[in-house]
């Protein structure tokens, strides 16, 4: 099923709002990627995009029977694998970009002491990108780890206008306790700037849009606002020059620092205007009114915004939480009429498992829409999918048991040639998911040996030698 | 220019100096370590590679040959050395120094190899740090020679002062040793005022009894030290009075609070500016410290967005297109009672003032809290209804279906049909219809039926009610125009009736707005510049869009965003100092109004300042008194006092829902209000600031009074209530402060002690050494018995590395043990009777809050000095520095003669050089590192 090809009526979209926005990085403006890439700005812009997506509640393919039936991990390892029985079937057209890592564990999401038993739903998300065990507390002394998106952002995020963005689909509550003695932040976000700094995630596409592209619902309105700001900036420059004549050197130096920022914002506006004048309009998502009711509509809007931001190099790093633990949302388009959480407790019964798999398959089928967008964006002589890394996975394995073994995890994109793709890696049971993160972070250019509880960096371009094609593999 | 910040040196040492001084004095008397009493647990510092037995073996073999009980060479015996963790810090320091310099073992004696010495030093150093950290390297113990110097009462002649410096201080502070980086060999006390920074450090050290160190072989008698300090202080103060140093401050930016308040007075809109502006950087307790404010492209972008969007909300936007905005309801708020602003007869929910951009239809989407499996939370009361009201008028009444579930297409939310609403600020509420009343007789009532955790109350036994999670306002759909609003009335002071009227009317409007925004009469140049934006907006639209564009430009202007005090060359050089100048009356007016009101000057103040009369003492005095009496001086409570007392921390503590079931977010809000109103009573009543510690009254409403167990207070509004016959008095009996210094499931005497030391006495304790196990890791159970917090702390304090600081911090906090983490009075803790007795660092015995207040009153000079330092830092936007100390002492002396009345401090600050004058900004100042650091910080954003 290809949702991407399906026309989706955007109730939220206002009629007649074709949106275009100029982008700072234009291949038209860059004669040769290589020459441009040599500049500092070019090197920075060419850095891989990272989009880390979490889906909660594991997968049907992580249950014993599901493994046998290849409901998630395909039977074959290496380059020969058949996706047709798997929830990943919609990714077949993108298999050259697909790296499946089967069999990892998230030890940090498990209960480490008696009071933690049963609290898996309220602890898992905090471990997904950190692979650190969260402290059980509903107070302000929350503690987990630094997430990989933020490790990357800390090293290279400053090269883009917005170092990183955090998006989500389900409502969040950034305060107080959720259940089992865990603060809600552990459930609400997957991005942690430090072990005590969870980053809030934005659910409203309009808020994302405004942050990225500025306020204004129509292109004309945004142009007008941009131009108004440009003339205000001109005037500020004049006014600062006047003020400077009356100031001592220290105040003058402070105002000069302000002028540097004025020029930076002017530069951003000029880039946009220059592009608009180049007569090469690019489609941008329409400014949405609010949060759509439909899951697919909401997810696609978020993907539109992410693709546009990546293209414009406004930000290169996204974390995206597509579900919320314990959510009982029904996905009518999946073909499963049961709620997400009830369905995830499939009792290991074949009929229930197959029902639950429909939801997993539906979630994964959101991805081709995004991959397609990235593939159609050129940057220099490559497309953005080539340049990007998309992580999609879950910190829970068998949702019926709440375990954190044999986790669903796939990587998409070639990370600027560092990831070959078309590969199914099966690692020995118990291999930390953090070993994948360690490797990912290194491929992104960050010199770090250890992420969370990693024991080594996993080679992501080779199916492990000792693995077999045995479909059970458990 | 090297600036000494007294907060981190002088003030700190004042108390810790006493503590360490006493410790060291005790050591000095018995230089030889005596065998320890009961065995002590090992300190978990960085693991030394040398185990205690190995350390002992080393010492016994190489040191004890001379340093035994019989010989006590150098007055030191190491015969009973049991390892670094058991040795007195002073001895550890001595050993460390002797070993590191190779002085010991002495030449000719057998020596261990270097690795062994290094390992022993590594083990000793953490312990030695405890002695060295505050006193400098201790000198070897020797018989102490006490030398009197001539003085008459508090007056010591310069010759005697010089004698004291050159006989005593230069023993260590000489050209060779330069202890603490200071040599006093060239120091002539007759010119001490030229070395004010050094002099202030000397005063602080001498006052605190930190110098000379207790181990100094030669020292003056106590009376000589006192006379020296007082004489020095007087000389500095006299010199400063003739040539006060006003200091230099960078220009200030409007912070979030000032921005929002300024917008409210200018155009009548109450907006949450955190939608646009990034959080303020806190420094020295406050959010308005100029040197901590830095620039970044993000900040500029947010100024531009705020100017754009606020101008649209203010004027109204007939071209507005639909957007959505979500308000989250407070999860911890009481859901049984009426929320202020919602219609009577409702309970819980949310009430906000939302600014609607245009007349049109809007839709409201209400989201409810769910249980972990996706059902509606709070089903005890059955079917509920929720009412949407605008300005108290019912717009929609919706049924909350108890079967609402995440399984539904709309999830746990319901949406209203489109509702017609007019532009401008409207009080919007979404609240449940109150269907029942009366007592609920549950054993546990989490947070007044609020949502501590969606599992608690899912089953029977606990009464729960549905909770609103958020309200999303989407619109406008079908814009019909823009109605008259408060902000439009403020802005459109004239209306053009013909095309010819437009320009003059726009000019009037712009002049009015710019004068308010720039805090000074707008000049023709200012107006011309802004009129260009009017013309631009007029060209693309109508008169109103011209005015809107002009307002947008004004709000983005540096004249609005920055409080710049231009240095107009040479025109105001003062008599008192060649390198300083007086601020003009308009600049003074801004400083005054942001200090007392956190607002721009009002018309009255602007009038006096424009007439050039504000600097006249009688005029200024009258303005200060007028402004203090004005309701707007509440800002001193909601801003200054709230920041100084750190009331924002109260919201960060969420007492455990099951242990402290009668606490909720509404109480937290009421507690903060109590403290603010209490502080305001000191401001408005011009009372002594010592009343902050001792007042026997407070401000309560029914909710808080019931929580405190005080009867006969009914209704939502706060009123003054006597505390006679209760256990409470002053600030330290108020819930806000007791809660903000607690953790979720227990009190924290350490946090409470630290709060008193930092906030009231200006002496932050040093941070704990690394790798010290926190209290949580100390056994909560011992010998099968649950321990009280006091007992657990005593376990913790057995650790010698912790004890030296905790014996200063803890007794303060333990005196407040009768107040539980929610500020409730208690007499037992975990079944153990509460023992609020203790002995403070200065030896005073305390028994509970009253005793603590009395002990603090003994140090009222310190409390008052810290209060003045804080008020001054807030008033001028920079922390108090060494050259401010004469001013602070003078303000405190004057206030002391005036009964420490609040207005004395305000007038003292307003009349000080630091407030009225500014140092000339010199090139060499400009090149200092701070500015570079600020820029670097700016770039990082």
Image (cartoon, helix red, strand yellow):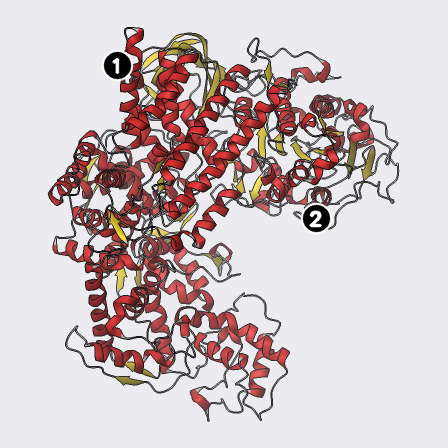
Disc 2 is placed on an element classified as loop
* CB under 8 Å between discs 1 and 2: no
Q: Nearer the viewer, residue A119 or B689?
A: B689
Image vertical order of residue A428 relative to residue B224, above or below: above
Element marked by disc 1: loop
Relative vertical location of residue B721 with respect to residue B869 in this rendering, above or below: above
Picture quadrant where residue A12 is located: top right
Q: Residues within 10 Å of mark 2 (few under 14, many from 20)?
A: many
Whether residue B269 is visible here, answered yes or no, is yes
Residue at (73%, 33%) from the top-left corner? A33
Residue A434 lies, in percent from the top left, at 70, 44
Q: Position of residue A447 (x, y in %)?
A: 68, 49
Query: Residue A1 location in percent, x, y?
Result: 76, 17
Q: Quadrant of residue B634?
A: top left
Chain of the residue under label 2: A
Nearest the viewer among B670 and B420 is: B420
> Is the same chain shared between marks 1 and 2?
no
Quadrant occupied by the N terminus of chain B: bottom left
Q: Which residue is mark 1?
A: B494
Q: Chain of mark 1?
A: B
For label 1, count other residues whose C-alpha is less than 10 Å away and answer few (under 14), some (14-19) or many (20+): some
Judge left or right: residue B685 versus residue A270: left
Q: Which residue is mark 2?
A: A454
Residue A168 position within the rendered picture, expressed as x and y whole percent measured from the top left: 58, 28
Q: Nearer the viewer, residue A330 or B824?
A: A330
Q: Is residue B444 visible?
A: no
Question: Would you place residue A4 above or below residue B149 in this image?
Answer: above
């Amino acid at each position: 099923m290809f949702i991407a090809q399906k026309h989706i009526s955007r109730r939220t979209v206002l009629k007649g709002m074709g949106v275009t926005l100029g982008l700072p990085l234009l291949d038209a403006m860059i004669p040769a990627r290589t020459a441009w890439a040599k500049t500092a700005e070019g090197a920075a812009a060419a850095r891989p995009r990272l989009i880390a997506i979490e889906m909660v509640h594991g997968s049907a393919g992580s249950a014993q029977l599901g493994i046998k039936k290849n409901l998630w991990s395909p039977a074959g390892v290496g380059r020969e694998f058949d996706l047709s029985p798997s929830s990943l079937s919609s990714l077949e057209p993108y298999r050259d970009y697909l790296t499946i890592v089967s069999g990892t564990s998230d030890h940090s999401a498990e209960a480490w002491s008696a009071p933690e038993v049963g609290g898996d739903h309220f602890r898992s998300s905090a471990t997904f990108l950190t692979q650190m065990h969260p402290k059980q507390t509903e107070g302000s002394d929350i503690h987990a780890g630094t997430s990989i998106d933020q490790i990357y952002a800390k090293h290279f995020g400053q090269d883009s206008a917005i170092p990183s963005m955090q998006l989500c689909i389900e409502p969040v509550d950034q305060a107080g306790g959720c259940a089992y003695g865990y603060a809600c932040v552990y459930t609400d976000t997957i991005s942690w700037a430090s072990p005590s700094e969870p980053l809030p995630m934005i659910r409203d596409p309009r808020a994302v849009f405004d942050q990225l592209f500025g306020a204004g619902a129509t292109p004309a309105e945004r142009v007008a606002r941009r131009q108004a700001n440009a003339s205000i900036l001109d005037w500020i420059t004049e006014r600062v020059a006047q003020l400077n004549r009356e100031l001592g050197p220290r105040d003058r130096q402070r105002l000069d620092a302000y002028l540097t920022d004025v020029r930076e914002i002017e530069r951003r506006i000029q880039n946009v205007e220059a592009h608009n004048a180049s007569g090469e309009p690019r489609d941008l998502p329409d400014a949405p009114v609010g949060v759509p009711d439909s899951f697919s509509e909401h997810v696609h809007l978020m993907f539109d915004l992410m693709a546009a931001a990546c293209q414009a190099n406004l930000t290169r790093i996204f974390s995206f939480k597509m579900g919320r633990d314990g959510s009982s949302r029904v996905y009518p388009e999946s073909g499963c009429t049961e709620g997400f959480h009830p369905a995830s407790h499939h009792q290991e019964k074949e009929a229930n498992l197959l029902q639950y798999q429909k939801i997993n398959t539906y979630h994964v089928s959101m991805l081709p829409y995004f991959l397609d967008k990235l593939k159609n964006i050129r940057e220099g002589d490559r497309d953005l999918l080539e340049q990007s890394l998309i992580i999609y996975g879950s910190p829970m394995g068998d949702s019926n048991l709440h375990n954190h073994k044999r986790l669903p995890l796939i990587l998409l994109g070639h990370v600027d040639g560092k990831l070959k793709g078309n590969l199914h890696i099966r690692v020995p049971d118990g291999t930390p998911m953090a070993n994948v993160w360690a490797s990912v972070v290194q491929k992104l250019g960050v010199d770090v040996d250890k992420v969370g509880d990693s024991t080594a960096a996993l080679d992501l371009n080779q199916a492990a030698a000792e693995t077999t094609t045995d479909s059970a593999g458990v | 220019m090297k600036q000494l910040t007294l907060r981190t040196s002088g003030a700190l040492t004042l108390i810790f100096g006493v503590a360490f001084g006493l410790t060291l004095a005790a050591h000095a008397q018995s230089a030889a370590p005596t065998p320890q009493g009961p065995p002590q647990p090992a300190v978990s510092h960085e693991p030394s590679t040398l185990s205690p037995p190995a350390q002992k073996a080393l010492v016994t073999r190489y040191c004890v040959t001379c340093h035994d009980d019989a010989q006590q060479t150098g007055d030191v015996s190491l015969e009973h050395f049991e390892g670094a963790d058991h040795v007195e810090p002073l001895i550890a320091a001595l050993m460390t120094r002797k070993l590191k310099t190779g002085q010991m073992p002495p030449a000719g004696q057998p020596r261990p190899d270097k690795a062994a010495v290094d390992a022993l030093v590594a083990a000793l150093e953490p312990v030695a740090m405890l002695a060295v950290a505050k006193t400098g390297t201790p000198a070897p113990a020797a018989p102490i020679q006490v030398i009197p110097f001539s003085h008459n009462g508090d007056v010591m002649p310069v010759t005697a002062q010089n004698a004291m410096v050159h006989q005593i201080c230069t023993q260590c502070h000489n050209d060779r040793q330069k202890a603490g980086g200071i040599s006093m060999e060239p120091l002539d006390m007759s010119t001490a005022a030229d070395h004010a920074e050094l002099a202030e450090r000397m005063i602080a050290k001498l006052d605190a009894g930190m110098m000379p160190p207790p181990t100094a072989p030669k020292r003056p008698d106590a009376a000589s030290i006192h006379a020296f300090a007082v004489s020095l202080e007087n000389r500095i103060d006299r010199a400063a009075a003739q040539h006060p140093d006003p200091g230099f401050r960078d220009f200030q930016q409007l912070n979030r609070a000032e921005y929002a308040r300024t917008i409210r007075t200018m155009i009548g809109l109450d907006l949450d500016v955190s939608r646009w502006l990034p959080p303020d950087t806190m420094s020295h307790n406050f959010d308005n410290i100029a040197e901590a404010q830095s620039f970044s492209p993000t900040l500029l972008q947010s100024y531009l967005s705020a100017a754009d969007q606020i101008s649209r909300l203010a004027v109204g936007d007939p071209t507005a297109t639909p957007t959505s905005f979500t308000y989250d309801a407070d999860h911890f708020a009481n859901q049984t009672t009426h929320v202020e602003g919602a219609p009577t007869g409702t309970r819980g929910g949310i009430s906000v003032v939302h600014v609607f951009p245009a007349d049109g239809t809007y839709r409201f989407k209400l989201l409810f809290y769910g249980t972990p499996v996706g059902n509606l939370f709070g089903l005890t009361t059955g079917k509920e209804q929720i009412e949407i009201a605008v300005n108290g008028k019912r717009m929609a009444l919706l049924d909350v279906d108890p079967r609402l579930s995440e399984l539904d297409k709309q999830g746990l939310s319901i949406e209203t049909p489109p509702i017609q609403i007019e532009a401008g600020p409207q009080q919007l509420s979404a609240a449940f219809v109150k269907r029942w009343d009366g007592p609920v007789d549950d054993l546990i009532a989490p947070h007044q039926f609020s949502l501590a955790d969606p599992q608690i109350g899912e089953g029977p036994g606990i009464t729960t009610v549905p909770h609103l999670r958020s309200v999303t306002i989407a619109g406008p759909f079908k814009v019909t125009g823009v109605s008259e609003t408060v902000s439009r009335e403020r802005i459109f002071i004239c209306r053009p009736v013909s095309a010819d009227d437009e320009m003059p009317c726009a000019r009037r409007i712009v002049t009015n707005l710019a004068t308010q925004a720039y805090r000074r009469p707008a000049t023709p140049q200012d107006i011309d510049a802004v009129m260009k934006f009017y013309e631009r907006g007029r060209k693309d639209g109508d008169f109103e869009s011209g005015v809107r564009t002009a307002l947008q430009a004004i709000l983005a202007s540096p004249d609005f965003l920055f409080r710049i005090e231009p240095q107009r060359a040479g025109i105001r050089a003062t008599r008192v100092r060649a390198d300083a100048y007086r601020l003009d009356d308009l600049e003074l007016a801004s400083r005054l109004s942001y200090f007392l009101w956190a607002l721009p000057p009002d018309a009255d103040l602007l009038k006096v300042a424009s007439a050039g009369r504000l600097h006249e003492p009688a005029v200024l005095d009258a303005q200060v008194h007028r402004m203090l009496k004005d309701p707007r001086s509440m800002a001193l409570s909601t801003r200054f006092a709230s920041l100084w007392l750190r009331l924002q921390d109260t919201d960060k503590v969420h007492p455990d829902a099951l242990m402290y079931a009668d606490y909720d977010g509404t109480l937290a809000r009421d507690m903060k209000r109590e403290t603010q109103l209490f502080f305001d009573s000191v401001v408005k009543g011009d009372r002594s600031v010592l009343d902050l510690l001792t007042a026997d009254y407070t401000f309560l409403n029914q909710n808080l009074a019931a929580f405190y167990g005080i009867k006969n207070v009914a209704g939502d509004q706060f009123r003054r209530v006597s505390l006679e016959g209760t256990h409470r008095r002053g600030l330290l009996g108020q819930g806000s402060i007791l809660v903000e210094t607690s953790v979720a499931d227990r009190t924290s005497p350490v946090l409470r002690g630290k709060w008193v030391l930092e906030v009231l006495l200006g002496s932050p304790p040093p941070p704990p050494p690394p790798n010290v196990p926190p209290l949580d890791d100390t056994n909560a159970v011992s010998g099968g018995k649950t321990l009280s917090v006091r007992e657990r702390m005593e376990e913790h304090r057995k650790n010698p590395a912790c004890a030296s600081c905790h014996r200063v911090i803890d007794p303060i906090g333990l005196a407040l043990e009768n107040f539980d983490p929610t500020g409730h009075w208690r007499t037992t803790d975990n079944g153990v009777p509460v023992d609020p007795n203790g002995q403070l660092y200065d030896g005073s015995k305390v028994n509970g809050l009253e005793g603590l207040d009395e002990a603090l009153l003994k140090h009222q000079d310190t409390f008052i000095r810290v209060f003045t330092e804080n008020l001054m830092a807030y008033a001028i936007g920079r922390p108090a520095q060494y050259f401010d100390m004469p001013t602070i002492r003078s303000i405190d002396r004057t206030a002391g003669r005036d009964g420490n009345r609040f207005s004395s401090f305000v007038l003292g600050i307003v009349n000080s050089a630091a407030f009225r004058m500014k140092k000339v900004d010199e090139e060499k100042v400009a090149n200092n590192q701070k500015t570079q650091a600020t820029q670097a910080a700016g770039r990082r954003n």
